[in-house]
Amino acid sequence: MARKRAIESDASQEPKPDGPPEGYEAFLVDLKGLIKTAQLRAALAVNRELVLLYWRIGREVLARQRDQGWGAKVVDRLAADLHHAFPEMSGLSPRNLKYMRAFAAAWPDEPIVQQLAAQIPWFHNCVLMDKVKDPEERVWYVGKTLEHGWSRSILVLQVESGLYRRQGKAVTNFQATLPPAQSDLAQQILKDPYNFDFLTLGDDAREREIERGLLEHIRAFLLELGVGFAFVGSQYRLEVGGEDFHLDLLFYHLKLRAYVVVELKTTEFRPEYAGKMNFYLSVVDDLLRHPQDEPSIGLILCKDKTTNTVMAEYALRDVGKPIGVSGFRIAESLPESFQGTLPTIADLEAELGD
């Protein structure tokens, strides 16, 4: 009897003839993860070595032009000779060699190149050389590219929108209303002004028209808001004392672990806007906030470019809830003759997806 049980036990361990053995699927998932991780590391290593190679080529060209007086035409000769020696290797055109020379001039210290520039793709570096002249600003964009995994198109969009100069510039009372770590993070996620140039509504657009436009182009809107914003709803209904109130836009920020209430205003900032937002945040904290959530945050977006900073600072000074005030801008309405020459939203979204 014992032997029969042993035989049955051994048989139960054998793979079924019509399927994989127990645990195979989990094993396969683990192996796929290992392979993908190795592939990613290999790709990053190849990119790092390529960028460093380009930097070293650029450094040598620079040194000889500086020390030995080689003229600009040597780049064309060098490109032809290198292409003849390495016909299978792309990236040795005269244009790219000039980028290598500019790259070495823009990043003179090899350790910094290894730590920063070599961590992003070569053509990302070309974008920064073309569009960003200030070294500190260039370092900032490299860091954000690494942090958020920006594609080249997204990097171009962020540079051309002046993100470096707008990030963290909103008027807020965060230092007085949030713990230090939360305050610093919340300050950095807000901008001033916000760029809604993907809307072409004109100066007389009403708040609901702007809101509808943002929702129609929600992907571009979320991109401008920044990483971490999850859309919850528009005209979000809250019932207080038997009356209905509606939030223009409600988000949840994944890093802050907090609700973010956004109110749109087509005028310059007025002190009463802060009081109304304070009321909204109290209600959201009471009705929506979970025990694990951080305090909800308010963002008042005013269309007028001349929002009075001093007035906003006074209005927020003694308010108990964390609130930020920023401006926003939208593109002017375009003449009909230009309409057909511009990319459509579908074109832009396709470009953003690369």
Image (cartoon, grey):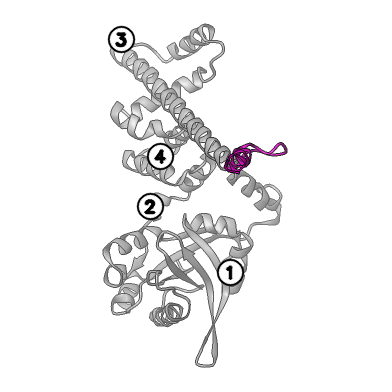
The residue where tag 2 is placed is 165
Q: Secondary structure at mark 2?
A: helix
Cα distance, mark 2 to mark 1?
A: 25 Å
Marks 2 and 4: in contact by CB < 8 Å?
no
Residue 261 place in picture, x, y as percent: 47, 72
* Residue located 64% across and 57% down the image: 334
Return the disc, 4 or 2, that comes first in the chain's sequence: 4
Q: Amino acid at mark 4?
A: Val
* Residue located 39% across and 40% down the image: 142
Return the disc, 4 or 3, that comes first in the chain's sequence: 3
Query: Looking at the image, is mark 2 or mark 1 nearer the viewer?
Result: 1
The residue where tag 1 is placed is 211
* Segment colored magenta: 1-23
Return the disc, 2 or 3, that comes first in the chain's sequence: 3
Marks 1 and 4: in contact by CB < 8 Å?
no
Mark 2 Cα shell of 10 Å, populated few (<14), some (14-19), many (≥20): few
Return the disc, 4 or 1, that comes first in the chain's sequence: 4
Cα distance, mark 4 to mark 2?
A: 12 Å
**Lateral position of residue 55 relative to residue 88, left or right:** left
Cα distance, mark 4 to mark 1?
A: 33 Å
The residue where tag 4 is placed is 132
Looking at the image, which is closer to me, 36 or 306?
36
